[in-house]
Amino acid sequence: MKILVLGSGAREHAIILGLRAEQTDHEIFVAPGNAGIAQDATPVRLDPLDGAAITEFANENAVDLVVVGPEAPLVAGVADVLRERGIPVFGPGRAAAQLEGSKSFAKRIMDAAGVPTGRAVRAATTAEVEAAFDDLGAPHVVKADGLAAGKGVIVTSDRAEALAHAEQYLPSGPVLVEEFLSGPEVSLFFLSDGDTVRALSPAQDFKRALDGDEGPNTGGMGAYSPLPWLAEQFGSERAFVDEVTRDVALPVIRQLDSEGTPFIGLLYAGLILTQAGVRVIEFNARFGDPETQVVLPRLVTPLSELLLAAASGTLEDQPAPEFRDDVAITVVVASEGYPEAPQTGRPIEGLAEAASVEGVRLVHAATASPDAPGGSLVATGGRVLNVVATASDFRTARDRAYEAIGRIRLEGSHHRTDIAARVAE
Ligand code: AMP
Ligand code: GLY
């Protein structure tokens, strides 16, 4: 198959490694990719936001499938442009991508579909925000309405801090004040062809910057899959997945279809398991990062077949995706200063030594080729590398991941040391 992947982060690298793991002769292009991805796919100079240029490239090169990695091209309507020209594309159109692009759109769809989520109030002024705080109580949850790369949300018991966060976003539109939900979080991905869904295996993301879930929210500092503790609460992982499919994914997919905006691509359900049951905290319209890095290495079913079936409306013919029992963890290596003010441009060394640890793969998030031949790769962003380790148990996977991290040298870098620590005990 000829496949074009749009994006340049670790998620896209993980998708490409998943396609490569099938050991079929896929020809894989990436636009624009990064230095690590360039070792596994052919980079093409295309702007992922330029639907016309991507269409032209896909037609000229007889591309069978375009996979849109990040949210920005989806919200910009790139999938619509491709689909109009008959190119199979994995990723929702602009309208359905509002599920991620607008928190109030997502709330409206959930209300219409009867999907369990926290109570939320749309507040356009400081006074309305204060009234919502009074109504919903502490801790306070404030969300910017649009895309904010994981930084639009604050959860705090400090009312002044919550209000200041709201006031930062109010000039550009209303914010959502939400009921605080308490419990473990789960990320569950569904492939959707607009009508049928197929669930992948659950994962957990570590969103805070520092050990012990301290520090600011980030795009995600690590993840693991599967979640053995789900079996204690639900009897089995399958029972949990079936419940969320029935109560969350299918109602949302049906609702979007009934509005004439079918969701074709990856529905990411961000869930909190409260005492009162499963609640949706957010939807994303694309694979999660870093969860994809731990879900796809466990996938046995060929990824390309699943993505193509979703893109071409034939998911019903696909059996439920299968996963191996091996566990996977990923630890993110971040630049000094991430998330507030990442220092970039620094050399990264020790990658070959790190990759030689058994069961370890390096997935690149923000790397560029050396300035001079024979030099080191350089870090170009906040989240730089994902060390992914698989093993038969979490303790071994953790040992492998942290052994590999110890071999990587990037001045000032930081990472969490407690990824999957509790589940390994
Ligand atoms: P979001 O961008 O909506 O995923 O929010 C980022 C993070 O904030 C989530 O992963 C949760 O840890 C936390 N969060 C969001 N909404 C709530 C809520 N209603 N109650 C408690 N925590 C929340
Ligand atoms: N890991 C969170 C996200 O992908 O949005």
Image (tube, rainbow, N blue to C red):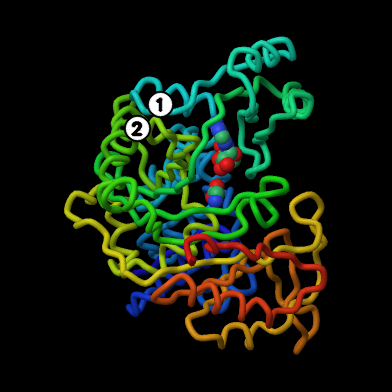
Query: In this image, 115 relative to 78: left or right?
Result: left
Where is residue 193 shown, x and y percent of the image? Answer: 30, 45
| Kind of residue at badge 1 | Met
Confirm or deny contact between disc 1 and disc 2 (CB under 8 A): yes
Ligand 1 in which quarter: top right
Query: In this image, 97 relative to 342: left or right?
Result: left
Judged from the image, the secondary structure of the residue bearing numbered disc 2 is helix
Q: Residue at x 61, y 80 (%)?
A: 404
Where is residue 380 shown, x and y percent of the image? Answer: 74, 64
Mark 1: give few (<14), some (14-19) or many (20+) Cα within 10 Å: some
Quarter where residue 194 is shown = top left
Residue 98, numbered circle: none
- Quick one: 45 or 36, which is closer to the camera? 36
Q: Earlier in the sequence, mark 1 or mark 2?
A: 1
| Kind of residue at badge 2 | Val
- For the residues labelled 1 and 2, the Cα–Cα distance comes to 7 Å
Query: In this image, 348 relative to 249: left or right?
Result: right
Where is residue 71 shown, x and y percent of the image? Answer: 54, 45
> CB at mark 1 closer than 8 A to ligand 1?
no
Residue 252, numbered circle: 2
Pointer 1 residue: 110
Q: Residue at x 58, y 60 (%)?
A: 222
Judged from the image, the secondary structure of the residue bearing numbered disc 1 is helix
